Image (spheres, helix red, strand yellow):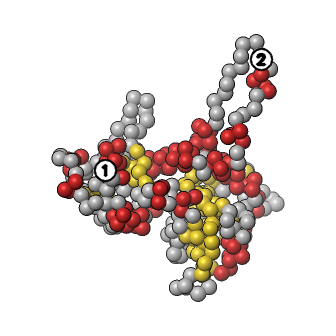
Amino acid sequence: MTKTVLTHKPNSIYDDLPEERYHFPATYLRQVERAIGDFIVYYEPGRTGLSERNRSGKRAYVATARVTDVVPDAARPGHFFALIDPSSYVDFDRPVPFREGRHYYERQLQRDDGATSKGAFGRAVRPLDEHEYEAIIRAGFALELDAARPAAVEPPSGEALWAGLQEEPADYDRPVIERVMSRPVRDAAFAHAVRNAYSATCAMTGLRIINGGGRAEVQAAHIRPVSDRGPDSVRNGVALSATVHWMFDRGLVSIGPPPDYAILFANSRLPDGALRLFRPERRLALPDDQRIWPAPSYLNYHRAQIFKG
């Protein structure tokens, strides 16, 4: 097993859904097979389409997940799918640039003269050693990992040496990927990413409420629940107020398919007057960045499995 970087363009010509599958040509088969059972990092390049003018990509590492298998693409000879465990997928809280200052997260991307190696960048699949992977993960989840650090314990009076001798709790000594895969860290990263994507505004009511401490009251709702292998991806999330989140989880409201993304209601089950809460257009307010709009497959799941309309 080998940690690996997989380059994914949001407007890829391949049949990709990074939370579930990564489509690639036979050129990279042996490299991707070595990643089976291990974690990968998705890298989003600067160019997001076929044209050189499509330069809106982040040029950053954006997510991590675990590869479970590699299977042939039956519809396209010479191509394969890396199957991803959806429950392992999580978007980074902060996209991590491939280079910060003079530091390259992947050593192979830096030439001996210090410049960026275009040849190395040209490979869509690249091996990643454990230290490089851990550095990227720490940078991508810095807020959550710092928040999860145990608080310092004050030494008893008169025992000045005690603080220097005490050990951090064993939980903090776990490998960084184990901590990132824990629900508290994943929940915090998912909530932060979804709130940012929707500008801390409820996508169904248009309400943006900030409490006295400056914190947004909007919540991050999973479209396909975590309990049924829903990934911690912005594309599987929508920002909702607490009341609407409750309705959404219980199937009283749902979201129609693109291009309309209509707000759907289980009218016979909604409380009296509930419709007044929602945007007059009866359409979801979507992020400016179309690449992080809800994925149709997750919306389909919610309508088929949860919605009571």
Residue 251 spot, x, y in % from top left: 31, 56
Going by the numbered disc 2, the residue's amino acid type is Ala
Quarter of the rendering occupied by the N terminus:
bottom right
**Above or below 72: residue 134:** above
Q: Is residue 77 left or right of residue 305?
A: right
Q: Residue under label 1, please give it.
A: 247
Is residue 9 in view from this perspective? Answer: no
Q: Quadrant of residue 77?
A: bottom right
**Residue 36 point in image, percent of width and height:** 67, 68
Q: Residue at x 33, y 64 (%)?
A: 303
Q: Name the residue furthest right.
A: 112
Name the spot of residue 6 as percent of width and height, x first: 63, 66
Quadrant of the rendered image containing residue 113: bottom right
Viewer-nearest residue: 93 or 174: 174
Q: Residue at x 24, y 57 (%)?
A: 265
User: What secondary structure is marked by label 1?
Assistant: helix
Task: Identify residue for label 2.
Answer: 160
